[in-house]
Amino acid sequence: MTATETEPELIDSRRLFKMLGVSEAHGFRLKAAGKLPQPVRLGKSVRWPLAEVRAWLAERGPTGELLTAKEWADRRRK
């Protein structure tokens, strides 16, 4: 990324799964199981807020496990 380019505010599944270090198939299994932050729907597209994903990754459990969408939402409300 050059100095004039900025990071997108919303990322697609491919970038999210790359950030997580998982395959596309496993990423979609995580999504189906509710283990990813809640995505944003834009027409037929699904995107995740980059800031939300980074905060979610920073809030891993004590053994490194990722929070489910419900656990993450509950923490955000506190």
Image: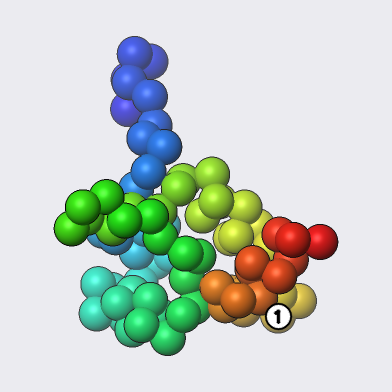
Q: How crowded is mark 1: few (under 14 residues within 10 Å), some or many (20 or more)?
A: few
Q: Give the mark count.
A: 1
Of 75 and 61, which appears nearest the observer? 75
State left or right for residue 15 relative to residue 68.
left
Measured as percent of width and height from the top left, residue 4 is found at 34, 13
Label 1 sits on a secondary structure element that is: loop
Q: Quadrant of the C terminus?
A: bottom right
Q: Residue at x 40, y 60 (%)?
A: 39
Q: Is residue 15 above or below residue 28?
A: above
Residue at x 74%, y 66% (from the top left corner): 75
Q: What residue type is labelled 1?
A: Thr
Q: Residue furthest top?
A: 4
Point out the image quarter for the N terminus: top left
Q: Mark 1 points at which residue?
A: 63
View extreme (front): residue? 43
Q: Of residues 36 and 62, which is closer to you in this image? A: 36
Q: Position of residue 73 (x, y in %)?
A: 64, 67
Reply above or below: 2 against 62.
Answer: above
Q: Is residue 1 above or below residue 62?
A: above
Q: Closer to the camera, 68 or 70?
A: 70
x and y, in percent, of residue 5 in the image = 33, 20
Query: Coloring scheme of the render?
Result: rainbow
Residue at 71 percent of width and 59 percent of height: 76
Relative side of 28 to 57, left or right:
left
